[in-house]
Amino acid sequence: MALSEVRVKALFAGLLLLWHVDEAQLSSAFTIDQVNLTLVPGPAVETGTNVRLHCHVQVSHSSEQRLVHSFSFLLNQGQVIYAKNSSDSQVEYSLTPARAANSGRYTCHVQVLEKERSSQEQRLTVSGLMTPVLTVTPHVIFEGQEVKVSCLSPNEAGSLIFHLYVNGNLIRTETKSPPGVEEVKVKLTKPGETQIHCKMNILGNYEAGVSNISNVERVTVRELEVTPTISFDPPFDAKGDFLVVDCADVKFNDIPRDARSKLELFLTKDGRVLKQEGGKEKCGLTLRTKSGDSGTYVCKAEIENLQKTVSGRALVAELFSVPEVRVTPSVVFEGDNFTVFCSVQHVADQRVNQSVISYRLFRNQRELQRGQRYMATAGSAHDGGYFCLAEAKGIGKNSTETIVKAKMLPSTPSISAEGAVILGRPFKVSCRTDRGSLPITFTLMRGQRLAEQKQVYALSALFNASAVGRKAELQEFSCHAHNEATRPRVISMPLSAPVIEPVSRAMLTLEPFGGGVTEGLDLKLTCSVPQGSPPLTFTFYHSPQGAPVSRQQQQLTQTRVPGTNRASYTVRAITRHQAGQYQCHVANVANNKSSSVIHVHVKLAAWKVALMTVCVILLVAAIGVLLLILIKRGTCSCTRTKKAGQLSVKPAKTRSNDPQRVSLVLEEQPAPNATPGMLGRSVWSERMSGSDSDSQSGEEDHSVEGQHSQVPQPLHSDMPTPTPPETGECTALMTNGTDTEYSQVQTTDADIPTQTEGASLEYAQLNHSDSEPQ
């Protein structure tokens, strides 16, 4: 079983492969030469004619196999109206019969396998339309009734536009698909014979034109016998107490029975329906005469949409005119007495006497009393609408309502300032009263001069007051109020309000005074204003030295002071970077002012000045010593000889109680390798024994040749031994007491220590140790 299925599938696949191979071979072995479309009997025909569309294709191929052609007939390059597959080379399609909707451009399209080709367009024009058929029912009606009309063209195609005519006048147009318009209702109102017909055209196909008119149907329209009448009793002037008005149809019995039930009668006056009846012959109304009954009455008969009217005028002589209510005085204030009086101006003397007319007075729809006069005291209890009722012979007439409302005089006004009153600026003043009838006239006075006046429908008014320069000037303002020119005015108290004085100018002072302060000290800034209402806001600013004040100001602090005109700010332990420009601003609700800019210089502290002075002195001394050493080096290099230096001892200048001094000068020619830094220094030998010191002392006594008999030994033994110089000129000072001085040329060195106790003064070995001093 499975093997046979496999064989069948393999066979089917082989056939399919062979078919694809044949198709590929065929597609490459044929070509569509041309496709021709022919219209028979021709491109232009009358409607109702049978038209054949003949399509022929010519194909060239090398195979003997017959090819399948796919034919398609297209209308206006899009709508396929007929399609067929055939192995024949030609196909036909018939339009039986051809209608105007078949007009257009036709094309034949042929496809063979994957190749396709179209014929050239052939234009078909079908002229004329089918004549529509008209039906009308019924053919006899009364005026105002309707008939049903149908206009049909079942053999046409497309969207049809039907036109309906009555007596040659177009009354209706409708767009319908075939078969057409069915049973539309047409109302006929003109009595006589009426002719109805229709015609049509195709929507969007203007070439087809308009069809011929349909058959003409005749309808007879009979006049409806509706004749309304109106009558009055009494017929002319109604001098009695009653008036009868009748509205009727005199040909009610001539109306068809089916139309009688639809008959309606209306009796109207001044557009108001007084009476209405349906399905009846008459519509009547009886009126008790009054002045308002005179005028034109209308009787209207109506059957569905058919209407006929007739009118008549009635003149009613009234017994008495409508009463009137008068209130005196016309304007009343609370507490005033007033009178309400009711009267009738005109009376028909021949029918009624003035004395028989009775009166009743009402307030707010409630009866007050019988009679013509009512007196009361004006007030809220007697406010309201007053009217009266006059009656005679059963006829009553109401007067129009008169409103009585007692006016209230305004209470004593109060005057106040709206917002802040700032000296030198305009401000607003409010005048207010607690009660009073509107409108109220408020007047703002400044002294004896009228400042401004307003009449308002409110209990208050707002005025613009001119500026004041002093607080006392506010007392000049007062407010007057009144709502009746004949009544006295009420006057307020003088204006009293808090006054804000603008800031006059700001002044900035410094402590310590002046523009300079020593570094490290406190700088106190005090800002004050001579004039200005509190609370005041003080703001202190600082800008660096040399910077524009307006651009680089830095706010230091801001203080709101409620009860004083000054504020302070202290810069603690001022530093040099806090030098610069200082300014303060003062503001209140009225304005703000800025002080002048004060430039503050910060001086150095005293210890810094002293330190710098010492440093400068030391620097100058060091430079002087260095210059002196350099000068001496030059001097020593010129005076020394080539042989060993000579030592000269000279007496030093003695003081009153100082020991005798001896100046030792060592002169030596500088050696080539001598150390320059050791020249000109005092040299002492190390500590020696007692024999050596004695010998040395003898030599010293011999060298000074009796000028000094003895050289005293130094008393201090703990002093360091100075380092002997190699070469140069030196001066040694020896003392016999506690003071020892060394003199080196022109400079005194007090810091060189003396020889220790018991030590002998000894000369260092120079270039030649056995040479004697000069």
Image (tube, rainbow, N blue to C red):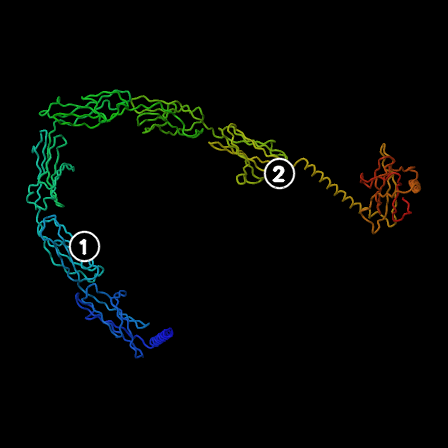
On-image quarter of the N terminus: bottom left
Q: Looking at the picture, how far across and down is residue 438, in whole percent?
A: 30, 27
Q: Looking at the picture, how far across and down is residue 688, in whole percent?
A: 90, 43
**Crowding at mark 2 (Cα within 10 Å: few <14, some 14-19, many 20+):** some
Q: Looking at the picture, how far across and down is residue 248, in whole percent?
A: 8, 39
What number is the disc on residue 159? Answer: none
What number is the disc on residue 576? Answer: 2
From mark 2 to mark 1, how far is it between C-alphas?
A: 104 Å
Q: Looking at the picture, how far across and down is residue 593, in whole percent?
A: 50, 33
The image shows residue 643, relative to residue 597, as above or below, that is below
The image shows residue 161, relative to residue 455, as above or below, that is below
The answer to whether residue 71 is left or right of residue 199 is right
Residue at the spot of label 1: 173
Q: Quadrant of residue 65?
A: bottom left
Q: Quadrant of residue 55?
A: bottom left
Residue extending farthest to the front is 1
Mark 1 residue type: Thr
User: Along the line of sight, which residue is nearer the eye, 191 or 247?
Assistant: 247
Q: Quadrant of residue 5?
A: bottom left
The image shows residue 306, relative to residue 469, as above or below, that is below
Local SS, label 2: helix
Mark 2 residue type: Arg
**Crowding at mark 1 (Cα within 10 Å: few <14, some 14-19, many 20+):** some
Nearest-to-viewer mark from 2 and 1: 1
Local SS, label 1: strand
